Image (cartoon, grey):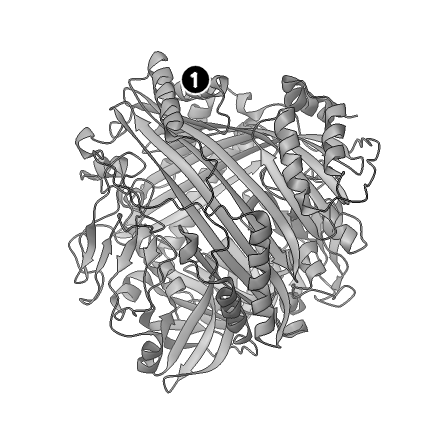
C-alpha cells in the first residue's frame, strides 16, 4: 500500500485567521460605502514530484494564497482578487472593486444569496487528510509506479513519467448577511503515462488515482501496471470505415457525457437561452431507466461541500427521476433571472451520480454485440445551443460481443438530445474520481466517421 | 538598454529594496549544490475584465498577482518553488527548496550579468488606464448596439473586454538579466440568434499587445459585432455536416490552428528530447509537400503571441520549422536545447511565476504560396470548405489531432453550395501536410484570440495560414 509516511502535522494556518481576514475585508467594504459584500480567502500548499526513466524529473513546491471580494452598491456590483494578503493589498482590492461597482449598471437580479437558504450547520464531511509525505518518499513512490509500468510489458518503449502530488488547503467564505464558514480539504494523486512501440507506431496512455485520503489511493504499482496495459492494447490501431454504430463510453468518458448534460441545465445557459435543454423541466430527457441525483455530503468525496460558493446549504436532490428532468443546476443569480430558487450549485456540482445498473463493463460489451468502445475523446466539438456533438475518438471495435482490434483517427457524432434518449442503463463500474460519478454508458445510433 | 529592464527593476525590485546584488546572492545559494543552471522570475501582473449582457455592463473585476519563481536545473532534473512575497527571506526559502533537487557538490560559477537590448515589439504603457472607465463601458455598449442593429433575429449579445499589464524580470545564472513589459488586450462578442424556434450562436473577437484604443480604431470592435452576427445567421441555415474522408479546403487565418495542433506541438523540444513525439528524430525528412513552409515567429510587432524576450530572457526569434516540405527545426527552451546540444529558439514560456517554463509556440503560421484562393475552391469537385474553427487538440505521441469547424460549406463541382453545421476534423500530424496540394497567396494571421494549453499552463499564441487544399481529411459530421 502507498502509505509510506506517518501523517504529519500540516502547516496550514488556523481557520480563525482566515475568518478574521474575511471579516476585515467585509468591514473595509462597508467603510467604503458598499451596501452588501462577500469575500473568500484561500490558502493551499503542496508538493509534486515526477520521475521519468527512473530519474527525478521535477520536484515542485506549491503555496498559493488568494482573496476575492465582491461588493454591491445597491444593485451594482464589482469584484476584485489578489494573491497578496497584506493589509495594503486587501484595501487596494476592496477599493478596486468599489470603483468598478460605481461604473457597472444596476441589475435587479444581482445580490447575495437569500438569507434563509444559508447554511446554519456546517457538517464535518471528513475532507481533510493531510498526507505529510516527504519529498524523498514521494520520489520513491513515483519511481516504483513508473518501474511497474515499464516492467509490465516488453513493448513499453518509453515513458512520460510518473507523478505523485499532495495538496492541502483551507478556505473561508463570508458575506454581509452575517454568514461565515470555512473548512480544510486535501487532495492527493498518483499518475503514470508510458509509451509503447517505436517510430510511426507509437502509442501513449495513462492511468491515475486521486483521493482526499492517501490511504485510499490505489497502489503505485497497480497504477503503473494499468498505465502499461492501457498503452500496449492500443498498438496496431486501425481506422474504421464511416458507419452508424452503438458507442460504449468507458466510465472516465461517460463522466464527460454527463458533464455535457449538467452543463446544458446550468442556470447561466438557461437564462441566456443557450441550451438545447431549455424549457425541459418536468419533461422526458432520458429513457425511463435513468436516474441522476446529487449527494453533496458523501464523506471524503472529492466534490463534497457543506455549502456552496454563496454560503447556501447544499442538499441531496434528484436531478433526473425515471428519465424526467426534475431540477436545474442554479446559483442565486441565474435562479432569480429564471424566477426560481437557487439549488446550491454556485460554483458547481457536488457529487452528481447516475444510478448504476446491474451489469459490469464486460457484460455491456457482450450485450452490445457489435459497436465501438471509446477510450479516448479529443477536441471540444459540442454546441450547447443546438446539442450538435462531434468529437475525435480512439478505442476498440467490438464484434460478437468481444474486442476485435484497437481503432484510432475516427470521429463520433450525434445530437446530444437524441444521444441522451438513446442511452442504455449505465454499468456498475462506477468511477468516483471526480465531481460526476458514473459507470460505462452505451449510446445507440451514433455516426462514426473514418476512412 | 534596456528601458524594459529598468522599468521592471522599478516595479519589481525597488518597492522591496532588492538590488541586482541580491539576485546574485540568491542564485549563489542555489548554485551551492550541483546545479547546472538556475533562474529567478519576478512578475507583477494586473488585469481587469468588463462584461456586458442584457444590454448593460453588469460585471467587472480586477486582479493583482505578483511573486517570484525559483528554478534549479541539474541535468534533466528541475527543482522549483515560488513565493507570492517578493522579499529576501522568502526568496532564500524558495531557493533552498528548489535546490533540493541536487546534492551538495561541485559548484558552477555565476556568470557576470549580460544585458541584451532586443527590439521592443510593443508599448510599455499600462493598457488598463489607456481609456477612462466610462469609455470602456461606452465601447461595450456600442458593440452591443451594433450587433442588435444587424438583424432582428439577434436575441442575446454578450461582450467582454479585458486587459492585462504584465511586468517580468528574469535573472539566470548564465548571466542573463532581462525585463519585459507586456500589454495584452482582448475583446470577445458572442451572439445568439433565434428564428422560428431555431437558435444558433456566433462568436467573434480579437486582441493585440496594445491598449484599448486598438478596438476603437477602424471600427474594429464594431466589426467583431457584425462578424459574430453573420456567423450565427449562416449557422441558422446550416444542414447536417457530411461524415467521412474528403478533400477539405481551409480558409486563411484562424484555420491555421491546423498547424498549431498537427505540426507545432509535435515540434516542441521537450517531446523530442524525450523521444515521445511522432516527429522525434525526423529532422531533415520530408513531412509536407514542397509548397509548405511553416515558421514560429515571436518577432511580429504587437501580435498576441509575440514576445520581446521569452520567459527565460532569450530574445524573440523567427524559427523555421518546415522549409519547402523538409522538417528543419524544433522549438526550444534553454534546458531542452542544452540537453540536445542546440540553442534556445526563444520559445521558453510559462503561464506565471508559479509555473515551470517549457518550450511553447508563439505565432505559428505557413508562408503564402502562389495559388489563387478562388481557383483552389474551383479545383474541388466534392468536398468541404471550412473557414472558422473552435479549438483543437493533439495526441503528441500518436500524432493524431483534431480541430473543430464552426463555419463550413459544401463544395460541389467547384462551387460553394450549402452551409453545414460544425464538425470535428481529424487527421494524422506527420501525414497531413503531405496531402496539401495547393497553397493560396492570401496569408492571414488570426485576429488575436488564441490561448494554448499544455500541462495545465495557458499562454497567449497566434496562428495563421493562407488558403490550403488538403486532399483527404476525415470530417466528423452525422450525414453518412
Asked whether B336 or A133 is in front, the reply is: A133
Element at badge 1? Answer: helix
Q: Is residue A78 visible?
A: no
In the image, what residue occupies the spot 33% across and 64% down?
A: A430
Q: Which of the image's four quarters has the C terminus of chain B?
A: bottom left
**Horizontal placement of A400 versus A153: left or right?**
left
Q: Which residue is mark 1?
A: A95
Q: Position of residue B156 (x, y in %)?
A: 33, 40
Examine the image and state in which quarter residue A429 appears: bottom left
User: What residue appears at the point 78 percent right and 56 percent down from the top-left corner?
Assistant: B340
Q: Is residue B45 left or right of residue A37?
A: right
In the picture, the quarter occupied by the N terminus of chain B is top right
Q: Give left or right: position of A199 versus A176.
A: right
Residue A328, image x, y percentages: 23, 48
Relative to B194, say whether A28 is above or below.
above
Looking at the picture, how far across and down is residue B68, in whole percent?
A: 62, 32
Categorize mark 1 by other alpha carbons within 10 Å: few (<14), some (14-19), many (20+).
Answer: some
How many marks on residues? 1
Q: Looking at this view, is A363 or B157 the one in front? A: A363
Which of the pair B189/A428 is nearer the observer?
A: A428
Q: Residue B365: x percent and y percent?
A: 66, 51
Is residue B127 among what the camera can see? yes
Please state the chain letter of the residue tagged with numbered disc 1 in the rendered image.
Answer: A
Amino acid at each position: 500500500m502507498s502509505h509510506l509516511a506517518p501523517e504529519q502535522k500540516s502547516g496550514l494556518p488556523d481557520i480563525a485567521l482566515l475568518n478574521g481576514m474575511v471579516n476585515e475585508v467585509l468591514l473595509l467594504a462597508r467603510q467604503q460605502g458598499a451596501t452588501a459584500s462577500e469575500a473568500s480567502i484561500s490558502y493551499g500548499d503542496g508538493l509534486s514530484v515526477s520521475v521519468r526513466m527512473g530519474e527525478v524529473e521535477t520536484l515542485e513546491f506549491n503555496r498559493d494564497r488568494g482573496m476575492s471580494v465582491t461588493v454591491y452598491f445597491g444593485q451594482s456590483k464589482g469584484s476584485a482578487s489578489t494573491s497578496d494578503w497584506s493589509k495594503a493589498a486587501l484595501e487596494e482590492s476592496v477599493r478596486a472593486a468599489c470603483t468598478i461597482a460605481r461604473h457597472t449598471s444596476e441589475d435587479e437580479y444581482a445580490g447575495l444569496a437569500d438569507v434563509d437558504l444559508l447554511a446554519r450547520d456546517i457538517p464535518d464531511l471528513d475532507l481533510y487528510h493531510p498526507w505529510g509525505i516527504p519529498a524523498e518518499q514521494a520520489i520513491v513512490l513515483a519511481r516504483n509506479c513508473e518501474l511497474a509500468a515499464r516492467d509490465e510489458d516488453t513493448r513499453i518503449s518509453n515513458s512520460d513519467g510518473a507523478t505523485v502530488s499532495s495538496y492541502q488547503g483551507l478556505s473561508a467564505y463570508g458575506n454581509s448577511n452575517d454568514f461565515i464558514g470555512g473548512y480544510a480539504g486535501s487532495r492527493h494523486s498518483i499518475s503514470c503515462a508510458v509509451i509503447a512501440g517505436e517510430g510511426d507506431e507509437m502509442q501513449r496512455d495513462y492511468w491515475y488515482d486521486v483521493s482526499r485520503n492517501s490511504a485510499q489511493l490505489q497502489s503505485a504499482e497497480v497504477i503503473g501496471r494499468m498505465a502499461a496495459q492501457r498503452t500496449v492494447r492500443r498498438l496496431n490501431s486501425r481506422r474504421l470505415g464511416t458507419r452508424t454504430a452503438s458507442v460504449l463510453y468507458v466510465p472516465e468518458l461517460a463522466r464527460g457525457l454527463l458533464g455535457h448534460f449538467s452543463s446544458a441545465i446550468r442556470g447561466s445557459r438557461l437564462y441566456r437561452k443557450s441550451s438545447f435543454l431549455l424549457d425541459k423541466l418536468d419533461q422526458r430527457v432520458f429513457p425511463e431507466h435513468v436516474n441522476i441525483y446529487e449527494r453533496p455530503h458523501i464523506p471524503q468525496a472529492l466534490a463534497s461541500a457543506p455549502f456552496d460558493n454563496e454560503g447556501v446549504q447544499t442538499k441531496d436532490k434528484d436531478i433526473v427521476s425515471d428519465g424526467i428532468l426534475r431540477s436545474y443546476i442554479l446559483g442565486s443569480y441565474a435562479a432569480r433571472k429564471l424566477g426560481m430558487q437557487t439549488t446550491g450549485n454556485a460554483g458547481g456540482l457536488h457529487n452528481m451520480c447516475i444510478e448504476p445498473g446491474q451489469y459490469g463493463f464486460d457484460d455491456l460489451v457482450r450485450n452490445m454485440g457489435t459497436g465501438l468502445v471509446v477510450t479516448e475523446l479529443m477536441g471540444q466539438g459540442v454546441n450547447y445551443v443546438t446539442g450538435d456533438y462531434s468529437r475525435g475518438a480512439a478505442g476498440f471495435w467490438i464484434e460478437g460481443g468481444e474486442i476485435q482490434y484497437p481503432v484510432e483517427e475516427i470521429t463520433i457524432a450525434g445530437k446530444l438530445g437524441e444521444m441522451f434518449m438513446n442511452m442504455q442503463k449505465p454499468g456498475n463500474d462506477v468511477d468516483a474520481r471526480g465531481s460526476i460519478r458514473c459507470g460505462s454508458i452505451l449510446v445507440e445510433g451514433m455516426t462514426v466517421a473514418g476512412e | 538598454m534596456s528601458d524594459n529592464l529598468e522599468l521592471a527593476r522599478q516595479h519589481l525590485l525597488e518597492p522591496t529594496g532588492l538590488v541586482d546584488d541580491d539576485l546574485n546572492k540568491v542564485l549563489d545559494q542555489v548554485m551551492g549544490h550541483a546545479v547546472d543552471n538556475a533562474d529567478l522570475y519576478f512578475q507583477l501582473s494586473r488585469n481587469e475584465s468588463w462584461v456586458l449582457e442584457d444590454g448593460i455592463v453588469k460585471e467587472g473585476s480586477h486582479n493583482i498577482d505578483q511573486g517570484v519563481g525559483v528554478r534549479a536545473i541539474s541535468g534533466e532534473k528541475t527543482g522549483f518553488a515560488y513565493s507570492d512575497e517578493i522579499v529576501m527571506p522568502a526568496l532564500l526559502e524558495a531557493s533552498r527548496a528548489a535546490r533540493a533537487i541536487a546534492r551538495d557538490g561541485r559548484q558552477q560559477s555565476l556568470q557576470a550579468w549580460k544585458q541584451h537590448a532586443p527590439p521592443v515589439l510593443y508599448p510599455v504603457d499600462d493598457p488598463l488606464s489607456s481609456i477612462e472607465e466610462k469609455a470602456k463601458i461606452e465601447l461595450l455598449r456600442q458593440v452591443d448596439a451594433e450587433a442588435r442593429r444587424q438583424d432582428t433575429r439577434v436575441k442575446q449579445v454578450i461582450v467582454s473586454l479585458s486587459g492585462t499589464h504584465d511586468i517580468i524580470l528574469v535573472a539566470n545564472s548564465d548571466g542573463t538579466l532581462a525585463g519585459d513589459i507586456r500589454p495584452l488586450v482582448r475583446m470577445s462578442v458572442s451572439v445568439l440568434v433565434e428564428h422560428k424556434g431555431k437558435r444558433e450562436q456566433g462568436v467573434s473577437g480579437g486582441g493585440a499587445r496594445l491598449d484599448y484604443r486598438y478596438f476603437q480604431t477602424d471600427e474594429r470592435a464594431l466589426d467583431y459585432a457584425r462578424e459574430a452576427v453573420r456567423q450565427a445567421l449562416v449557422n441558422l441555415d446550416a444542414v447536417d455536416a457530411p461524415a467521412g474522408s474528403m478533400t477539405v479546403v481551409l480558409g486563411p487565418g484562424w484555420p491555421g490552428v491546423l498547424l498549431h495542433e498537427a505540426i507545432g506541438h509535435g515540434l516542441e523540444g521537450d517531446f523530442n528530447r524525450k523521444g515521445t513525439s511522432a516527429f522525434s528524430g525526423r529532422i531533415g525528412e520530408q513531412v509536407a509537400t514542397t509548397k509548405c513552409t511553416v515558421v514560429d515567429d515571436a518577432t511580429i510587432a504587437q501580435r498576441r503571441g509575440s514576445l520581446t524576450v521569452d520567459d527565460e530572457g532569450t530574445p524573440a526569434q523567427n524559427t523555421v520549422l518546415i522549409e519547402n516540405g523538409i522538417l528543419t527545426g524544433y522549438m526550444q527552451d534553454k534546458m531542452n536545447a542544452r540537453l540536445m546540444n542546440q540553442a534556445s529558439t526563444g520559445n521558453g514560456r510559462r503561464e506565471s511565476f508559479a509555473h515551470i517554463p517549457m518550450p511553447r509556440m508563439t505565432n505559428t503560421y505557413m508562408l503564402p504560396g502562389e495559388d489563387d484562393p478562388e481557383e483552389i475552391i474551383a479545383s474541388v469537385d466534392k468536398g468541404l470548405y471550412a473557414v472558422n474553427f473552435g479549438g483543437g487538440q493533439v495526441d503528441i505521441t500518436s500524432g493524431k489531432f483534431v480541430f473543430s469547424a464552426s463555419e463550413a460549406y459544401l463544395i460541389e463541382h467547384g462551387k460553394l453550395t450549402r452551409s453545414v453545421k460544425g464538425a470535428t476534423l481529424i487527421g494524422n500530424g506527420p501525414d497531413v501536410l503531405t496531402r496539401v496540394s495547393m497553397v493560396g497567396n492570401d496569408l492571414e494571421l488570426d485576429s488575436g484570440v488564441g490561448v494554448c494549453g499544455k500541462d495545465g499552463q495557458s499562454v497567449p499564441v497566434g496562428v495563421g495560414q493562407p488558403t490550403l487544399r488538403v486532399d483527404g481529411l476525415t470530417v466528423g459530421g452525422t450525414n453518412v
